[in-house]
Amino acid sequence: MRVGPVVALMVLSSCSQQDAARAPAAGGPSDAADAPVAIDASDDSAIDHASHPDAEDGIDAPADATSPPGPVVYPPDRTHSPITPFVATRLAHILEKNPSSRRDLFIKIGDSITVSGSFLHCFAGSSVQLDAHTALQPTLDLYRNATIAGTSPFNRTSLAAEVGRTAAWAISADPSPIQQEIAATNASVAVVMYGTNDIGWYGDDHVRTLVWFHDNMLNLVDQVIAGGIVPILSTIPHRDDSASHDAWVPTFNATIRALAQGRQVPLVDFYRELEPLADHGLGSDHVHPNTYAAGACVLTPDGLGKGFNVRNLITLEALDRVRRAAIDAQKPIDTDAPTMQGAGTSSSPLLVQGNPFTDMRSTEDATSDVLNKYMGCSSNADESGPEYVYRLDVTTPVRVRAIVLDGGDVDIDLHLLSGTVSESACVARNDTIIEADLTAGTWYFVLDTYVDGGVERAGEFTFVVLTCQPGDPACQ
């Protein structure tokens, strides 16, 4: 149900109230679906894993009793999302949708950061220094030796990548740019990054912009999967040209993470890798990554101080992981990936862990249906459809931004409850977003299904929670 403006508790900083300028329709700052993959709620193990497991790349670890048996959570402290036996099988099933696809081809889908000659093109030539990353040589050779219309996938001009574009453009028209590129290549993998031009599309209405971006990206990902292509999603860099845009980059990136996790397809956290670099690895326009003077494929420590060099490395790593996990059927295994805790009921709520926390599921699968009208929020709205309950344990005061995104005829409302799971404990509710300062204690989010004229508007939703400490510059 559409329930009006954002509800806030206590005093909110400008983290949630930044202004944004509208991006131009055809230029950014520079000029059928698979069913959702339900995250296993039966594992009660804590989220505890290495902060950067990529050093193990190139080693095929065997499956063992510690391997998660089902869908996994994509933890925020890794550059590459886990590829467990479940995920590897998932990727293989995607490829089975088009058995005739070329396993030595990938396509590029994105905006100017993808179109740039500094992105991947140099891998097609001889100016490559893998340095400590020689384990990637087989993947480099696989794609460098492949040709399509006289070029390799590294330096091909993609029909689905264009300067200044958004995710909406990639799926527009008939055939869409994505459909055209798929038909032209018959590739098996897609490298996807949008969001830089999407932020601010509807001026200072960030919530409307995020809803628009989410719907387009979900459509895009599902179209790619339906075509038998494994999408590798990427987070986006900072927008240091605009404080208002940059304030929303983490939220957009959390949404991208949620979509990748929800479909159990690979995610590359480009933003994470750029965060510690000088100027966030961006050039003089504070939007596009910079490039090492000796070349974008110089993967030495000095070279990896530049944004495009970093993107080239982590993209080649991601292609390598997919090759070993699905294309070559060697199934390299990450054994320490976390799974969701809880069942989503009042007695066993799903635990909000990690920052950001993301989840994607459908209330059609919910086993809880006990909360109907949230009197604590003075609401008479009929929320008698099924719900999912999430618990957030706060040890020190935090600022929280919680967002639910649905689409079509689905209508899932967001409720914040204090201390206990009851209708009277509701302190804030909204159709899409709640932003609040929370004191120490136990808090609950209930994502409940609105009932319209006796019809339950149940279905798939994306849930994102971001927290920070009051006064944190990231929230300003």
Image (cartoon, helix red, strand yellow):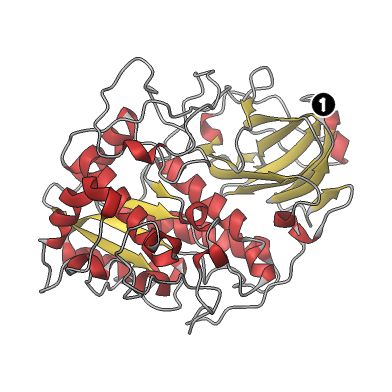
Residue at 89 percent of width and 47 percent of height = 10
Residue at 40 percent of width and 71 percent of height = 291
- In front of the other: 135 or 374: 135
**Residue identified by numbered label 1:** 419
Please state if 60 lies on the left or on the right of 451 as rendered: left
Please state if 299 lies on the left or on the right of 427 as rendered: left
Outermost residue toward the bottom in this view = 31
Up the image or down, 351 lies above or below 145; here it is above
Please state if 322 lies on the left or on the right of 74 as rendered: left
User: 10 Å neighbourhood of mark 1: few (<14), some, or many (≥20)?
Assistant: some
Quadrant assignment for the C terminus: bottom right
Residue at 32 percent of width and 72 percent of height = 294
Residue at 60 percent of width and 36 percent of height = 354
Amino acid type, residue under disc 1 in the picture: Gly
Residue 432 x/y as whole percent: 68, 51
Residue 23 x/y as whole percent: 58, 78
Task: Name which quarter of the figure residue 175 lies in.
Answer: bottom left
Secondary structure at numbered mark 1 = loop
- In front of the other: 26 or 410: 26
- In front of the other: 244 or 447: 244
- In front of the other: 200 or 214: 200
Residue 181 x/y as whole percent: 24, 68
Task: Name which quarter of the figure residue 190 lies in.
Answer: bottom left
